[in-house]
Image (spheres, rainbow, N blue to C red):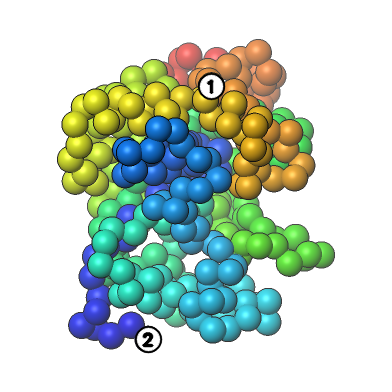
């Protein structure tokens, strides 16, 4: 168990609903932290490569085979795994997470506040997200929309195989947002995917300011260029991408916003609007444009 003396606030959770720009932001951050590299290696982003849900990470740090445990037993141990990671590092640690913020059955925070430096929460409008999830997982648009509306939506729950990631409760799109922003009591910076695309310098700069990372404008602009969607697509075409699901044709597919209108029918759009109107307004999306 991590000692009280070793506890430090040095973990930044890079949190998001799946397919909301998490990987893109981590690639940008990796490029920024390694400015001497002329190009990004999408399969080697060591500085920001830790996954909160990694089964290998859990097993190696806990010393317990997670395949022998129930989900509630794993969640009872996960906070201590992160405390140990924190205690063994002096620098800031960036960890990708798709889970909704939550407490385990013992009431312990799954992502402990006493080791958390901050949270970058990436969000994407649920209409484009529905299309992206459909493509990513090889499911229909209505199935994808239903996941965004499902309080019990979870990842890595296939009982017929041992997934390389632990089970993650995601919840609905709105509940995921509320869990981090309203319930966690953590210092959260919300970053919209659409702003990353439409005004990249301003948006990425604000994130770096939140993270207290001070670099020259030229380095920020260079990292943005190195991680343009066109370049990421080219890199994936050349060398593949290890985070791409087998069922998906490509991970970096479109990198656009508001393209859902050509693909979603009126009923799916209406249901998503009804279910998520409150959070859409809070995120200052123009709700009239989604009809």
Looking at this view, is 72 or 119 the one in front? 119
- Sequence-wise, the earlier of marks 2 and 1 is 2
Tag of residue 230: 1
Tag of residue 1? 2
Q: What secondary structure is found at the residue carrying circle 1?
A: helix
* SS under mark 2: loop
- Local crowd size for mark 1, using a 10 Å CA cut-off: few (<14), some (14–19), many (≥20): some
Q: Nearer the viewer, mark 2 or mark 1?
A: 1
Q: Residue at x 63, y 55 (%)?
A: 155
Q: Is residue 259 above or below residue 281?
A: above
When asked about the image quadrant of residue 71, the answer is: bottom right
Residue 272 shows which numbered tag? none
Q: Is residue 185 above or below residue 74?
A: above
From what the image shows, is residue 79 above or below residue 212? Answer: below
Going by the image, does 6 lie left or right of 74? left
From the top left corner, tell me how far across and down residue 241 is, in percent.
Answer: 62, 41
């Amino acid at each position: 168990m991590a000692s009280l003396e070793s506890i430090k606030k040095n973990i930044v959770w890079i949190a998001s609903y799946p397919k909301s720009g998490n990987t893109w932001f981590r690639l940008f951050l990796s490029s920024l932290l390694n400015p001497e590299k002329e190009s990004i290696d999408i399969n080697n982003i060591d500085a920001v490569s830790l996954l909160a849900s990694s089964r290998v990470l859990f097993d190696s740090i806990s010393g317990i085979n997670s395949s022998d445990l129930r989900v509630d037993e794993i969640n009872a141990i996960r906070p201590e795994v992160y405390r140990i990671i924190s205690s063994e590092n002096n620098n800031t640690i960036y960890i990708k997470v798709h889970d909704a913020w939550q407490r385990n059955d013992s009431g312990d925070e799954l992502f402990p506040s006493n080791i958390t430096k901050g949270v970058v929460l990436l969000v994407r409008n649920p209409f484009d997200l529905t299309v992206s999830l459909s493509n990513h997982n090889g499911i229909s648009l209505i199935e994808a929309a239903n996941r965004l509306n499902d309080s019990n939506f979870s990842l890595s729950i296939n009982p017929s195989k041992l997934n390389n990631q632990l089970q993650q409760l995601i919840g609905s799109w709105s509940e995921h947002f509320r869990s981090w922003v309203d319930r966690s009591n953590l210092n959260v910076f919300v970053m919209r995917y659409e702003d990353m695309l439409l005004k990249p310098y301003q948006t990425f700069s604000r994130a770096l300011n939140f993270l207290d990372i001070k670099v020259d404008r030229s380095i920020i602009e260079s990292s943005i260029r190195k991680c343009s969607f066109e370049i990421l697509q080219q890199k994936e075409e050349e060398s593949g991408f290890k985070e791409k699901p087998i069922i998906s044709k490509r991970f970096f597919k479109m990198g656009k916003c508001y393209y859902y209108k050509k693909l979603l029918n009126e009923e799916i759009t209406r249901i998503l609007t009804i279910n998520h109107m409150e959070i859409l307004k809070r995120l200052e999306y123009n709700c009239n444009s989604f009809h």
